[in-house]
Image (spheres, rainbow, N blue to C red):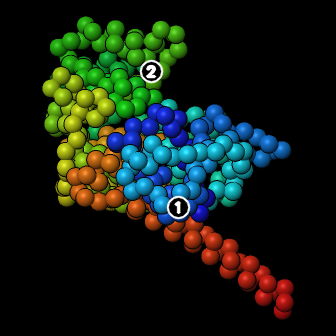
Amino acid sequence: MNICFLMYPWDRVAPETDTTLRMIHEAASRRHKVAILMPKNLTIRESMTFGFCRMLKREEKVPQNIMSFYKKAEFKEQLVPMSGFDVIFVRTNPPLDPVMLNFLDSVKDDTFIVNDIDGLRKANNKLYSAAFEDPENKIIPITHVSKNKDYLKKVIKESDSEKMILKPLEGYGGSGVIVIEKTAMQSVTSLLDFYITGKRGEDHYVILQEYLEGAKDGDVRVLMLNGEAIGAMKRVPSSDDVRANVHAGGTAHKHVLTKEEKALCKKIGPKLVADGLYFVGLDLIGGKLIEINVCSPGGITRINAFNRVKLQQKVLDFVENVVSNKEKAIARKHAFRKKIEDA
């Protein structure tokens, strides 16, 4: 297969922990043709989408050690048609680039894109999980999304809880997540001014969410593949931070999904697949869904280490199976067409 990883710069990869690198290594180990591409290097040539791709040089023997593979990797830049790839992994860091999606629109019928372009458009911000149908709030925390400061202050005052979570709608990686308390209402107006209006005077949406008591103990990152949970880990925040994200100072621990967490994954899995969101990361607290990460979900390296598995193998198995079934369907179509022509 020909596989392209649409991603961040190669020199910004953290080889010790990077999930994308594990998938690239697995693809190369299976002798697939691998390319990496930054979104800024997408281009249109003669009305078709091309990319200035860095093609990974094929080695006779791919180093099994990830660090050795990363250090020895050699690339050759070449302008190639994007529809020539069997699979494109969208592994760019948030926020999602809408122009990149416009480029990929022209190849989505020819190439299997993980995750689907229209699915990314739907789910690239926190509204996707907030809008799940859950009238009794069994799997989604009570959530409010607005730019209206008076409304948000009213929500805080009328809340049964003394604490609530405030975060920007377009935030990622735990950025901007804070706890607000009723006892500090004098600061709320200033915080809302900062989060909504900011320095440029352009109003932005914010999320106000019920505070889950289990938050102080951390969250659970679940990796979902084709609608099913394939691995999980617990992320515990440092003593001086509400965020459990590892790069924000949290620590990762082994985790076995509870019965409630498995039920949640099973409930939302079909919708993820229907929206073309094949490889995503779920963030759970107290058995409730906090966020769905669809751009470049991470965690494979740590989950692998905790459980002595290689989840990247499951990901590559999945895309190989999809492409194989697609090619078989095309071959059948050609064979049937030939029978009709010869009849």
Tag 1 residue: 60
Q: Which of 248 and 204 is in front in this view?
A: 248
Q: Which residue is drawn at 69% across and 56% down?
A: 84
Mark 1: few, some, or many residues within 10 Å (few <14, many ≥20)? few
Q: Determine the CA span between mark 2 and mark 1.
A: 57 Å
Left or right side of 173 for 275: right
Q: Quadrant of the image for the C terminus?
A: bottom right
Is any atom of residue 279 visible in this view?
A: no
Q: Nearer the viewer, residue 226 or 51?
A: 51
Q: What element carries label 2?
A: loop
Query: Measured from the top left, where is residue 189 in percent x and y?
Result: 33, 10
Q: Earlier in the sequence, mark 2 or mark 1?
A: 1
Mark 2: few, some, or many residues within 10 Å (few <14, many ≥20)? some
Residue 206 sits above or below residue 22 on the image: above
Q: Residue at x 70, y 45 (%)?
A: 78
Q: Nearer the viewer, residue 285 or 94?
A: 94
The mark lying in front, picked from 2 and 1, is 1
Query: Measured from the top left, where is residue 182 in percent x and y?
Result: 20, 17
Q: Quadrant of the image for the N terminus?
A: bottom right
Q: Which residue is drawn at 39% across and 12% down?
A: 194
Q: Quadrant of residue 98?
A: top right
Query: Measured from the top left, where is residue 214 in percent x and y?
Result: 16, 38
Query: Measured from the top left, where is residue 298 in percent x and y?
Result: 37, 44
Tag 2 residue: 147
Say what amino acid the circle numbered 1 marks. Glu
Find residue 82 and name its label. none
Left or right side of 144 for 73: right
Total marks placed: 2
Say what amino acid the circle numbered 2 marks. Lys
